[in-house]
Amino acid sequence: MDTPRTRRTPPAAVASILCAARARAGLGQRETARRAALSSGYLANLEAGRRCPSTAALAALASVLPFTAAERQELEAAAVTDAGLSNPLRQTPGQRPVPATGLSSHLSASSK
């Protein structure tokens, strides 16, 4: 039997980084969530510091938000690989998760 993942406390900086990047983009929470294909409730929890972002969620947010290099580095350090769509138990056959090591290249490519 698989063991459940451990709840982690998100670093405080994650919430402020997401809020700042969203403000720079001039987007509301709902619109940001829609563009990133995330639920607005999940984004609200990330911005409130109640959830740790998955690598897949951060990759999706990086496609719509203008993160700085320092923010990308901080977010990559906070990303978890066993949550949300990044969880190996939620993968469908043939689907590949966003690897933690590839997140920085995805984050930097999406901010150009």
Image (cartoon, rainbow, N blue to C red):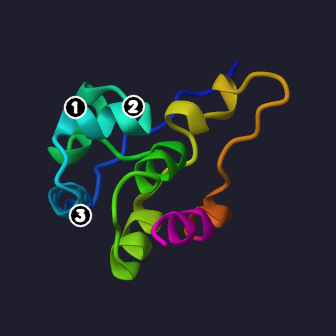
Q: Amino acid at mark 1?
A: Arg
Magenta segment, which residues? 105-112
Measure the alpha-carbon separation of dots 3 and 1. 17 Å
Tell me what residue is drawn at x 65 percent, y 49 percent.
Answer: 98
Dot 3 corresponds to which residue?
Answer: 17
37 vs 105, left or right, is left
Whole-percent x, y for residue 76 in the image:
47, 65
The vertical placement of 65 against 84, above or below, is below
The vertical placement of 11 against 95, above or below, is below
Mark number, residue 42: none
Q: Residue furthest right?
A: 94
Quadrant assignment, res 44: top left
Dot 2 corresponds to which residue?
Answer: 38
Quadrant the N terminus occupies: top right
Whole-percent x, y for residue 73 in the image:
43, 75
Total labels: the figure holds 3
Q: Nearer the viewer, residue 4 or 47?
A: 47
Tell me what residue is drawn at x 50 percent, y 37 percent.
Answer: 83
Mark number, residue 30: 1
Q: Is residue 108 magenta?
A: yes
Element marked by disc 3: helix
Q: Residues within 10 Å of mark 2 (few under 14, many from 20)?
A: some
